[in-house]
Amino acid sequence: MEKSNTPKNEPFVGHPKKFGGSLGGCGRNRSQGDEAPPRTAEQYERCQRDANRTRRRLRKLGSGRGKVSPGRSRQIGRRGHYGSTCTWKGGGASSPKGAGKAPMFGDYEAQRHWQEVTYNLPVHQWYFNTTDNDLNYWGLDYPPLTAYHSLLCAHIAKLINPEWVELHKSRGYESQAHKLFMRATVLVADFLIFFPAVVLYCFYLSNGSVNKKVCTLLCILLYPGLILIDYGHFQYNGVSLGLALWGVLGVGLGWDALGSLAFCLALNYKQMELYHALPFFCYLLGKCAKQGLAGRGLLLLGRIAVTVLATFALCWLPFLSDPGQASQVIRRIFPVARGLFEDKVANTWCSLNVLIKIRSILSTDSQLYLSFAMTLLAVLPSSIKLLTKPTFWQFKLALVNSSLAFFLFSYHVHEKSILLPALPVCLLLNDLPLIAIWFLQISTFSMLPLLLKDGLLVPYAVTSLAFLVLSIYLLSALERSSASELKLEGYRRLCFVPPKLDLARVVRWKFYISVAAMACLSVACVAVDPPPRLPDLFPVLVSAFSFLHLPGMVIYFHVVQFTAPHSRKGQKKTN
């Protein structure tokens, strides 16, 4: 290979499809057409070496389990996904995506690397590209609270084994002890934040007997999507979702300032909590307006505003001394250059891209404006309804509708983002059990390609089946599926459904067919080789099939929000 004359620390500018993306595994996975960050000449040469090594491995690959078809081989050699797809047929070991594969080593390495960076570098270097902090190698791209959490975990890791967070030398470090430590940090965070919030919600803000509340609690904790992503994919979604749930608890129990504080912490942990932001804003503003903006309502609005500003100021305090620091953090947590969507996600843009190559037709700015306009249009109806009628029932439904609108239409959506609509749907398990169980199954299934890359076939099958059977049994979902319990009266009025048509029976049959189709597609993904010319056939089928459910879910939850009243028993308040 001809050596480049570009200095090592200068950006290497080249064609993004040729030099950027995930060539040889160097960089986050990006689909074609996404804008890649600049590479140095050294990084480019390293990527080329790894890509060539991958191609040599593929040429030597023999027959047997895990055999790759010619079309798949060409794709893997081109994109650097060797290993993450070849292990699908094995389905045994549970390793995070890209684990052990240089030069990026997968999402497990991302979490470890953030601990390394936050422990060894000063705060003002965390989000900047320096000789000690290569942002192209799993650079921090979450808000400050995530960085502080990584720093806390790093201090504990340093006490156990200093090699886990040693600057530069720990890159690509993997051991069973460290994986156990990482999973333990997820479990501890869930015990401190997510589990208590779920317990309090089920016992204070859900209806029914103690037995029914315990059943609802078990079903929420058994939701397979969150378990598989956090414990198999090495994520901390339980922290942000748990903080958001504490916010729901606060406003549901009348502690509006504390609820605002908790939600601000969630937003400062993961920026995707913006999916839930508009319902919080509309509910609290509507409540203030209802109390009178010239009296008690104004005082409440003032308390909430001070709480929000103080929380953001404390979270961002180390970055506020220099405007350049704050602006760099914002650029990192909102990466416009990464494109409209990532991988095979079950949203509108990825599904539409199968028929219309929207990223080739529209510029990046046009895609951004289009997604913003569509998201705003989709989220406004439920938000306006909540603003005019700020009840807790309306608030829960608005959380579902807002997060679904963001997932379907917003910019740069990941497969894991389906967990954000899943949280408020979990809160409806006691109210609309069959629909909630159906949605939660779809949300887990939509992440199947990602879970298979992580080697989580067996955990996926076991947790999904266990959740389906136990939730239907514990919540009596099939018995509680009459037209009135499914709140289908609004459909009859709006869609002119014939009186003799049993809508509840139609919904049940659709549920059976959907579950059977998900099972068949899951088996096909691991047992059938795709055609050589369509190597991404099954991931596309999974995302498209999952997407087909979501517009119907959006319509259903909107109809329920606009037409179905709810008992005020669930809106308990305590002193």
Image (tube, helix red, strand yellow):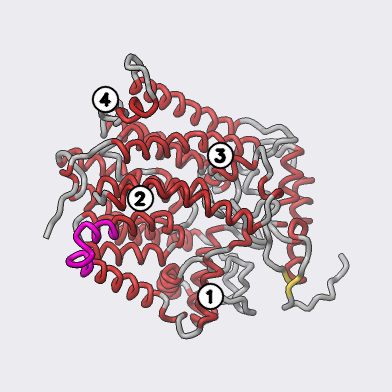
- Reading the chain from its start, which is encountered first: label 1 or label 3? 1
Residue identifier under label 4:
479
> Which span of residues is magenta-colored?
284-300
Q: Looking at the picture, how far across and down is residue 67, in whole percent?
A: 69, 38
Front position in the image: 568 or 519: 568
Distance, label 1 to label 3, CA atoms, is: 35 Å
Is the C terminus in the top left, top right, bottom left or bottom right quadrant?
A: bottom left
Q: As displayed, is residue 472 above or below residue 206?
A: above
Q: CA distance from mark 2 to mark 3?
A: 31 Å
The outermost residue toward the left is 575
Q: Is residue 92 visible?
A: no
Query: Which label lies toward us, 4 or 2?
Result: 2
User: What's under tag 4, amino acid-wise?
Assistant: Glu
Give how far across and how far down residue 284 sits, in percent: 28, 59
Q: Residues within 10 Å of mark 1 (few under 14, many from 20)?
A: few
Question: Quick one: label 2, few (<14), some, or many (20+) residues within 10 Å?
Answer: some
Q: Main secondary structure of the magenta part?
A: helix
The image shows residue 518, relative to residue 292, as above or below, that is above
Q: In the image, which is nearer the foreground, mark 1 or mark 3?
A: 1
Give the foreground label among 4 and 1. 1
Q: Nearer the viewer, mark 2 or mark 1?
A: 2
Residue at the spot of label 1: 327
| The residue positioned farthest toward the front in the image shown | 294
Q: Residues within 10 Å of mark 4 (few under 14, many from 20)?
A: few
Q: Is residue 315 above or below residue 213?
A: below
- Residue type marked 1: Ser
Check if residue 287 falls in the magenta segment: yes
> Could you tell me which secondary element the residue under label 3 belongs to?
helix
Q: Tell me the residue that label 2 is attached to.
A: 384
Q: Looking at the image, tell me whether mark 2 or mark 3 is earlier in sequence order.
A: 2
Res. 130 image quadrant = bottom right
Residue 446 visible: yes
